[in-house]
Every structure is written in structure tokens, then in C-alpha cells.
Amino acid sequence: MISKSHQNWFPVWQYLNQPLFHSDIKLVLNPGRFWQQYRIEYLNRCWMRQCLPNHDPQR
């Protein structure tokens, strides 16, 4: 079972290191909105990692 401390972990470093004046990446100042977007992006990264075909170096 996952403990409560790991369940509500907030990515402080990623929040504080957002690019300020980047034209392609939107700055999110609301921590709740940032947390929501971070979780969605994290799930997408995990899903894409699992969906990639296995690379066979001998072929």
C-alpha cells in the first residue's frame, strides 16, 4: 500500500524551474494547476514509454 506522504508528493523543483520567458512553454503560476498538468504529462510519458516497440539491436 502506498503511504500518504508519497501519494501527495508535489514536484517543487520542477515547479520552481519553469522557464519564465519561453514562447513555446506556458508558465503556470497556480500550484494546483501545475500539479494537475504535471500528473497528466507524467502519465503520458509513462504510457509512451510502455507503448514503444522493443528495439532489437541484432536485426
Image: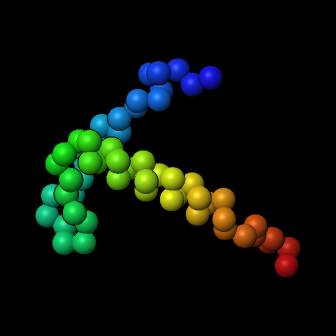
Q: Is residue 12 above or below residue 14?
A: above
- Foreground pick, 56 / 46: 46
Quarter of the image where one finds residue 26: bottom left
Left or right of 31? Residue 3 is right
Left or right of 12? Residue 22 is left
Residue extending farthest to the right is 58
* Quadrant of the image containing the C terminus: bottom right
Where does residue 11 sit, x and y in percent of width and height? 35, 39
- Residue at image position (21%, 53%) is 28
Q: Is residue 14 visible?
A: no
- Foreground pick, 3 / 24: 3
- Residue at image position (47%, 29%) is 7
Left or right of 26? Residue 8 is right
Where does residue 48 sit, x and y in percent of width and height? 58, 63
- Residue at image position (52%, 58%) is 45
Where does residue 52 sit, x and y in percent of width and height? 67, 67
* Quadrant of the image containing the N terminus: top right
- Foreground pick, 43 / 17: 43
Q: Is residue 46 above or below residue 58?
A: above
